[in-house]
Amino acid sequence: MQRTPPRPRAGIIGTGGIAHAHAEALKLAGAELVVAVDIDPDRAAAFAAETGFAQTAPSLAAAADATLDVVAICTPPSSHASLALEALALGLNVVLEKPPALSLRQMVELQAAERASGKHVSCIFQHRFGTGARKLAALQESGVLGNPLTGFCNTLWFRNQEYFDVPWRGLWDVEGGGPTMGHGIHQFDMLLHLWGPWQEVTAFAGRLARRTETEDVSTAIVRFESGALSTVINSVISPRETSQLRFDYENATVELEHLYGYDDSHWRFTPAPGQEHLAGLWADGSAAVPSGHPAQYSHIVEAIGSGAVPPVTLAEAYPTMELAAAIYASAITGKTVRRGDITEGNPFFDRADGRLEPWKLEKSNA
């Protein structure tokens, strides 16, 4: 008789807005909700009562006796890497909300700590796990779509000035960047996941409408190793909000338009003339799974319970973080950046703005 794997014992660090999505996803995936960690005891207690965590703690160290298997880090981005390093040192698996780190150096340091600990870090890039993305990946791998040719990846969102007036928002030291790092990253992560290694990028960015250190919009042209080309726009100054991806192949166009998460109704498949039979392959009747934290956490919790490697690994997330760094590097230096250019000794390896102060407040239109 096959034994059911034990339920992974889970904790959450940081009980702000995004932590609720993690808590619900952990619960749906069958994890045991053990401890909620927050430096604000009242907020931790309210969160635990609302979501079903059994206990609270003021720090990860204080929760060390909870015998956790995994901890989800849901704090502001500047603490992601340091808390992940602490958790790995305690022998815990880690789930990191985006961005997993503020720099490529931090990503490399996390990978080294992960190897030394024998545990795993999973980065939240949930758009990879909806039915639409998985179906497109399968069709692409089968070859029936032909070669990828061109497309676009637009994250056109709207955040008013009050959003940026929160003390930790819009700061290079805390968020690591603006919409390129904190908003559009989910969209272009899915683009890279589907179209494979990127080769080079030319980008522009600016602070056009908000009082903030970082950019409020960026736009880039990305060339992939396959030869395919795509534009990427990341904006938080677009009044009509939408998230759009278009994938043009030799034999079909596949489009996705949603806002913060998609289901099957958000996709459109258009076969090329003479390729109408491909429409039936898209409408294959497979079970519809929307993108979102639950879609990824079902794989994470199953992997931890069985001793497998949970997705998305640091190595799998690195190309996405590298493209984000390259978009900044290209926009700030005015040069095309190739994959692999940003390594030790490059100023953009340590910080997304390269400490080059690209946009002075007094020069802003905001």
Image (tube, rainbow, N blue to C red):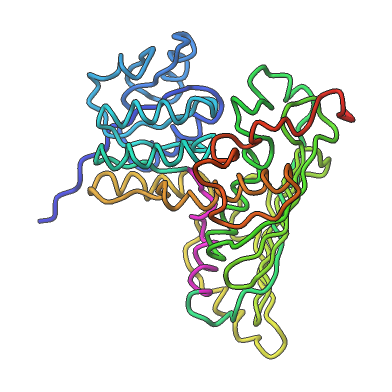
All told, the count of numbered labels is 0
Picture coordinates of residue 282, whole percent (x, y): 57, 74
Q: Is residue 3 rendered to the left or right of residue 217?
A: left
| Frontmost residue, 4 versus 185 | 185
Which residues lie in the magenta part? 124-140
Up/down of 2 relative to 51, above or below: below
Q: Quadrant of the C terminus?
A: top right
> Which residue in the rendered view is the most extreme toward the left?
1
Residue appearing at x 36%, y 30% in the figure: 85
Picture coordinates of residue 253, whole percent (x, y): 68, 73
Residue 128 included in the magenta stretch of the image? yes
Picture coordinates of residue 188, whole percent (x, y): 62, 53
Picture quadrant of residue 30: top left
> Which residue in the rendered view is the most extreme toward the bottom?
274
Residue appearing at x 62%, y 74% in the figure: 148
Q: Quadrant of the N terminus?
A: bottom left
Picture quadrant of residue 268: bottom right
Residue appearing at x 25%, y 44% in the figure: 305
SS assignment for the magenta stretch, majority: helix
Q: Is residue 22 rendered to the left or right of residue 209?
A: left
Up/down of 58 relative to 73, above or below: above
Q: Is residue 132 rendered to the left or right of residue 57?
A: right
Residue appearing at x 65%, y 40% in the figure: 183
Picture coordinates of residue 299, whole percent (x, y): 37, 50
> Which residue in the rendered view is the most extreme toward the right?
365
Q: Is residue 34 rendered to the left or right of residue 181?
A: left
Up/down of 156 relative to 228, above or below: above
Residue 310 included in the magenta stretch of the image? no
